[in-house]
Amino acid sequence: MKKRLTIICLCLLAVRIFATGQSVRHVVLISIDGFRPDMYLDKSWPTPNLQLLMQQGTYAKHLKSVFPAYTYPAHAAMVTGALPARSGICYNQPKNSKGEWNWFMDSIKAPTIWQVLKKSGMTTASVEWPPSVGKDITWDIPEIWDSGPNGGSDRITEARKYATPGLIEEVEQNATGKLDSNSMNEEYLSLDEQAARAAGYIFRTHKPSFLAVHFACVDGMQHGYGRDHDSVKLAAACNDHAIGDMLEAIQRSGLKESTAVIIVGDHGFSTINQAFRPNLLIKDIDARFIAAGGSAFLYRSSISTVSNADLIKVVTEKLNTLPNEKRRLFRIIDRKELDEMGVDSAALIALSAEPGLVFSGSTKPAPVANHGPGTQIQQNELEGAFYTVSGGHHGYDPNNPQMYTGFIAVGAGIRKGGVIPDLCVTDIAPLIARLLEVPFTCPDGKLVKGIVSEN
């Protein structure tokens, strides 16, 4: 009974917060990693806040990711309005990574909304946003972890080295209590609750013009169990409750009438059953595939003297020697189509899998190595080019419906009762810029009609 009353109170709070539209002075961007449209469109999901907010504002039937549909390229697109070829963030990890991820903002090659707002004299804040290590954010608790073999889960120890000086200690004293490798751990749902408490405190106390917070646990549960496991619903319910915490922080800040809230995802998910190591087929060729879940991208070796056309030809011939039941599980994407999708210009071709199949970049059997969430599959001790796996993954073509992610906007400046068919993660930065009335030219994003109130 107590739990039911809590849910009702949180839903009523959402109604009170967003009952009237006013001029926008603050934007709160909440990213749910692995967020899917069915998590608010399907009423069987335990997400009362999301389902009510979509009625109070404007929602999309789906939000489209980038290619590959991966966390860091998608989040970079949100704050730049740029596809990977222009943002410079093409994968979660740099191509020559030894375990590190694209944590640092100086890896982004396109102007960011953080920079534009800073130049306009506005303050900003970030909690667990990927990537956010840098100097452009006023109050920052970045997402970063130890890149060693035992890293990936602890989201606070390494972050202390890069956070705004004194901010974590301030949050600990006033909002969360002591944060450590247990309370800020990607393996536990409390990570997102703590991130919400930290973000809510920063918003309530420092009142930034723009705040972005990233929730990671829905993604983690889907990697472990696939799309439809009860654990995924549990993680979604926890994120919904964390959003309630954020709504309460907005209410208590006294800024509800001038605040817009945007809730987004970065990619969808596919339940997986087998993996393919394409590099095993091209050991004698001066080229290698970089695997990204449901896609893989071919790069020439720096020592190769063969033309791109000849490399593509011989690699394609190798792939076409596969038995038909395996070859039909993926398609080859040529450079012309990759250009249209905004993919890294250095990639010669790409492989795009059917849902259920993922790629591995391994060239030989190796011990399992974990360099962060969702990367264990890249090194697997099982023999063979194809082998059985379980769980879930993403990185597929963003036009695949299983890769669709979610979008809800509500509050000041947002149309009430609106529904739009779709938009792209590159369209988030133009929306933020329009709401805060700052000029921002994006290479790929656009302001989608039907979201911003005309009043």
Image (spheres, rainbow, N blue to C red):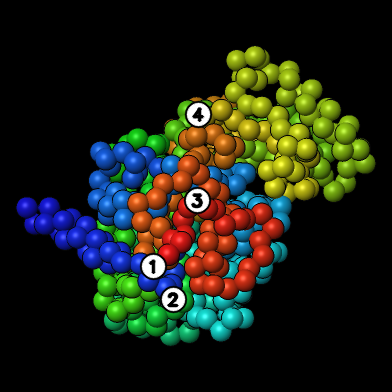
Residue 188 figure quarter = bottom left
**Secondary structure category for the residue under label 3:** loop
Residue 240 figure quarter = bottom left
Mark 4 surroundings: few (<14), some (14-19) or many (≥20) residues within 10 A: many
Q: In the rendered view, does 314 fall on the left or right side of 67? A: right
Q: Residue, x 37% and y 45% (percent of image)? A: 221
Q: Which residue is mark 1?
A: 412
Kindly indicate whether the residue at mark 2 contacts the one at mark 1 (C-beta within 8 angstroms): yes
Marks 1 and 2, how far apart in space? 8 Å
Q: Earlier in the sequence, mark 1 or mark 2?
A: 2
Q: In the rendered view, does 174 fall on the left or right side of 368? A: left
Marks 4 and 3, how far apart in space? 19 Å
Q: Which residue is mark 3?
A: 266
Kindly indicate whether the residue at mark 1 contacts the one at mark 3 (C-beta within 8 angstroms): no
**Secondary structure category for the residue under label 4:** loop
Foreground pick, 179 / 198: 198
Q: Earlier in the sequence, mark 3 or mark 2?
A: 2
Q: Residue, x 54% and y 66% (percent of image)? A: 434
**Secondary structure category for the residue under label 1:** loop
The C terminus lies in quadrant? bottom left
> Which residue is most to the front?
455
Q: Which residue is mark 4?
A: 356
Decide: is 255 above or below 445. below
Q: Is residue 374 visible?
A: no
Label number found at residue 25: 2
Q: Residue, x 63% and y 41% (percent of image)? A: 291
Q: Amino acid at mark 2?
A: Arg
Q: In the rendered view, does 321 fall on the left or right side of 98? A: right
